[in-house]
Amino acid sequence: MGLSPAIHSPRRGLSRSEAAAYVGISPSFFDALVKSGRMPKAISIGGRRVWDIRQLDEAFEDFAGNQSNSWDKLVNAGGGSD
């Protein structure tokens, strides 16, 4: 008795709650980010709304690219050791 191969295959489309969990936020905050355009809109497949995991990755990278931390500031200021 084996499991369906689809269970073990990576999925590209995620539901709203899965998409929110994937990027580590609540579904309501995810909705707000979609509405503001900072997260991608869903696509419709057979009447079901799904989010493309690659588009979620791109949006997440945009957030990460706008962040800096104290270590980055120290290194960029020339204070890091070589």
Image: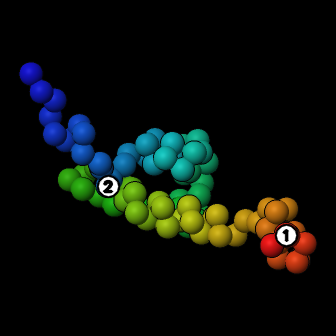
In the picture of the structure, the residue carrying the numbered disc 1 is 81
Q: Is residue 14 left or right of residue 69?
A: left
Under circle 2, the secondary element is loop
**x and y, in percent, of residue 29 in the image:** 61, 48
Q: Is residue 42 left or right of residue 64?
A: left
Q: Is residue 65 above or below residue 15?
A: below
- The image's colouring method is rainbow
Q: Residues within 10 Å of mark 2 (few under 14, many from 20)?
A: few
Foreground pick, 9 / 51: 9
The mark that comes first in sequence, 2 or 1, is: 2
Which quarter of the rendered picture does the N terminus lie within?
top left
Foreground pick, 15 / 63: 63
User: Which amino acid, by three-letter code, is at mark 2?
Assistant: Arg
**x and y, in percent, of residue 6 in the image:** 19, 41
Q: Is residue 49 visible?
A: no
Q: Which mark is residue 12?
A: 2
Which quarter of the rendered picture does the C terminus lie within?
bottom right
**x and y, in percent, of residue 37 in the image:** 56, 67
Q: Residue furthest front?
A: 82
Q: Is residue 64 left or right of residue 44?
A: right
Under circle 1, the secondary element is loop
**x and y, in percent, of residue 74 in the image:** 87, 69
The residue under the point 29% across, 58% down is 44
Q: Quadrant of residue 35?
A: bottom right
User: Which amino acid, by three-letter code, is at mark 1?
Assistant: Ser
The residue under the point 29% across, 48% down is 10
Q: Residues within 10 Å of mark 1 (few under 14, many from 20)?
A: few
The residue under the point 47% across, 60% down is 56
Q: Quadrant of residue 80?
A: bottom right
Q: Is residue 28 left or right of residue 53?
A: right
The alpha-carbon separation of the residues under discs 2 and 1 comes to: 42 Å
Q: Is residue 4 above or below residue 1?
A: below
